[in-house]
Image (cartoon, rainbow, N blue to C red):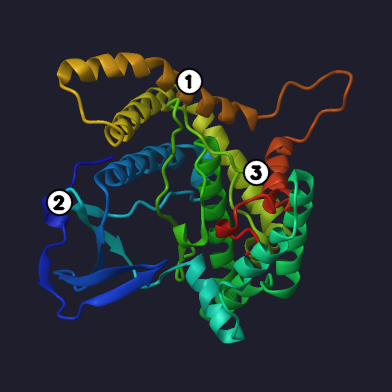
Amino acid sequence: DQEPQVDQNVVLHRFHPDVKVHHTHGFSHRRIGMRGNDGKRYSFLVQYSISHITRSDERMMQVYVLFNRMMAKYKETRNRNLVFHVPLVVPLTHRLRLMQTNEAHISLEEVYEQSCAVRRVDPDQPLLTYREILHKAEGCEQNAKARLKAYDTICHTVVPDYILSRFIDRVVRAPDQYWAFKKEFAAQIAISGFLSYIMNIGDRSLYKLSFSKKSGRIINSEFYPAYNAYYLIDCQESVPFRLTRNITTFLTPLMVDGIVSSVLTAANSCLLRNQDVIRNYLCLFIRDDLLSWNSTKMSMPDDRGQRQLESQLRDKIRNNVSLIIKRLHVLMPSQSDTKNPPMPMNYKVSQLIKDATDKERLCMMSSTWQPWF
């Protein structure tokens, strides 16, 4: 929390002559390199983006910065070195921006596709199997059973649970580095899932979740809440966050029940300690987000019309903020009943992890979410 010092800023020395093309999930982005006066290379992706999404990403980065400051001052989160990755974004025009990236970053979808290439399996084979089994089912009850059957079939025959583990085994060789990587990856998965849970952010597909092969830090893309027709944050998913088979197999029960559970509890306690500041900031965040989202539905009114719109959205903003604060309180242990034995401190957090790994809940997710990975 200090003012930037001009003499410590990196000055652009030159551009690299080679321009690479980065392919991900059907999109192609140019990757340019810049050499600073410190001798390091800085890579940026040239992204074409919608102005509403760009503004949503900027607001989420401000949330990351705010939460990082809070976690740096709280004992339990500071001891665990919890921090959200905040990418550097430089907007050029309303629809064009530069996003800082690193060649060490790789998405879970790329890990899955590399495994399919090694095993000589069609990456779309799980979707074809899923569609074939559900095509034979009729009715809601049979559809739920068919989803579970398709999930079990894909897990046993098409998508093994060791894909992520074997990939990281090839990348990280030294035992001490492997342990540090796994510990950092578990903590990052926990705080990423925690934020998606309290803000009700869904659709965390494989291509939206990346990590660094050097540090294990998680990089989220397209990470912002969605709203329904009533201007309320809406996410109708059966699991609170992504904690699927390959992730739990790599982390092992030791990390899931230890690191992930403790990080969720520490992050929740940190935000509850600063809930007054968070409440005020969330009011501003959701107010700007709703106005920006509303501008995509209709033309922006003049100043008087915008003030009337803000007064109409005041109750919606208050309801959205209350839902987020309520989710923070839900994870805390309730007052112990004298008739019943006291529950463990992390009982509700453990229940949340259980819901995220329950196959009956995972099978109800969309096939494009790929719950079997």
Residue topped by disc 1: 319
Residue 276 drawn at (x, y percent)? 44, 21
What residue appears at the point 24 percent right and 45 percent down from the top-left corner? 51
Quadrant of residue 1 within the rendered picture: top left
For marks 3 and 2, the one nearer the N-term is 2
Task: Report how far apart the C-alphas of labels 3 and 1 lie in the structure.
Answer: 22 Å
Q: Which amino acid does label 2 sit on?
A: Thr
Viewer-closest of 215 and 48: 48
The answer to whether any part of residue 88 appears in the image is yes
Residue topped by disc 3: 238
In the image, taking residue 142 as reference, residue 265 lies left or right, namely left
Task: Report how far apart the C-alphas of labels 3 and 2 lie in the structure.
Answer: 38 Å
What residue appears at the point 16 percent right and 19 percent down from the top-left corner? 303
In the image, taking residue 4 as reference, residue 205 lies left or right, namely right
For marks 3 and 1, the one nearer the N-term is 3
Q: Which amino acid does label 1 sit on?
A: Asn
**What secondary structure is marked by label 3?**
loop
Which disc is residue 93 wearing? 2
In the image, taking residue 308 as reference, residue 139 lies left or right, namely right
